[in-house]
Image: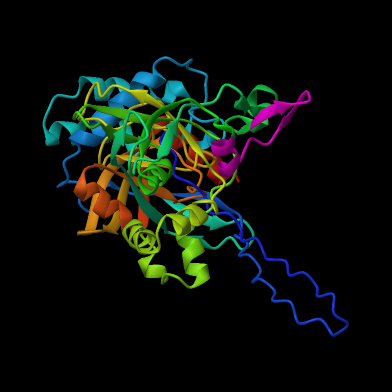
Amino acid sequence: MLPRFEHSLLIGSVLLASCQPRPPEPVPQPEPPTVERPETLDFQPVEWADMPGWTERDLAPALQAFQRSCARLNRRADSDPLNPQARWAGRIEDWRGACAAAAMTVAGPDAARSSLEAVFTPVRLLARDAETFETRSDGLLTGYYEPYVEVRRERQGEFTQPLRRRPDDLITVDLGRFDESLAGRRIVGEVSGGELVLYKDRARIETDNAGDIFAWGRPVDVFFLQIQGSGRLVFADGHEERAAFAAHNGLPYRSIGRELVQRGELEAHAASKQGIEAWLSARGPEATAELFGVNPRYVFFQSESLANPQLGPRGSSGVALTPMASIAVDTRVMAHGVPVWLSADLPELDGWTGLVIAQDSGGAINGPLRGDFFWGWGETAERRAGTTRARAEWTILLPHTVVARLFAETELN
């Protein structure tokens, strides 16, 4: 996937002491970083009637998204956990019946609803503080989209920022191959002197010309394309193709929006994509380059044809994303393929409820009840994604066998 990215901690500035024989001036101290308390998932059984909007919503987009996830699950062994890091979600064999029912469901809202109710049990998700055991019922929901990006085959005019393919020297290591407890964890680097070391940062990648260039865009467009993780490229002759996520350099993402807020350049409420673009436009190329340099994370792409323009890019689960029916989650606590009934006040859609499927992940999507909502593509998706910052309640749909096992274990504990 489509990668969405985590905020890094502030780096405090260091002031050099003066050489003059006078008392040193007080050195400003940065505010201590916020330390997030560890949280775990908690589960609460609910009834279908407890899910507002369940009987009114169109479930077809989410059902089709679930069918695509099932196509991936069907290639795995029965004994495989759905996610080794979220074993509460059960094994592949637990999901066979749900996938078979979804495949046989005929068109129509009532048929989809009846099919889902027959094979799933709704379970409310809560986040529990691992130290105080206090729970919360909602979490942060942000949004992302697939942007249209105007590009050129060669560098020209304002199209000065390259889109690069994955370099040959970039190495991704699946730690689960070495230790089962690290399943799903990956590190990125390059080999130097027989050792795996950190990969180049943003500045070094450009200086060393790492990764073949396949298109050129405006600097601000390419930067935000890297944040979204994929996009639809539009060339001068009208030809379109997808820039799909290929890899990143493994270095932490640092939000330029947060940087501008900390500098006092923007108010927190104005640090949206639109607000940042307005700031960059007013400051010019030099300020733009300096601000982009704050973020060492760099994303590489691969070009793909738009085989089905009605579907989004592949998420990290390996399936194409569906507008307003796919969500990115933290796979350290949540499993791909799980249906989620969300309740949230979304931009232009107060009191929205709907079914989505966990099909993507991202560096900024961390912890229980943390999600990133895929809006799709086009102007409406861009506008809504840029202002999505809601508190969302989660109800997941689990096969009956998984629920029975889950609450049996809960009672034993």
Residue at 54% in and 48% down: 253
**Residue 104 occupies quadrant:** top left
Q: Which segment did they paint magenta? A: 189-207
Q: Residue at x 57, y 46 (%)?
A: 296
Place of residue 69 in the rendered image (x, y in percent of width and height, measured from the top left): 35, 26
Of 124 and 301, which appears nearest the observer? 301
Residue at the limit of the structure toward the left, as seen here: 108
Q: Is residue 216 above or below residue 27?
A: above
Foreground of the two, 68 or 9: 9
Task: Determine whether 222 is above or below 213 in the image.
Answer: below
Residue 302 figure quarter: top left
Count of marks, rendered view: 0
Q: Outermost residue, right direction?
A: 21
Q: Is residue 375 visible?
A: yes
Q: Quadrant of residue 39?
A: bottom right
User: Is 410 on the left-hand or right-hand side of 315?
Assistant: right
Q: Determine if residue 314 is in view.
A: no
Image coordinates for residue 46, horizontal then vertical, percent: 35, 49
- Front residue of 142/76: it is 142
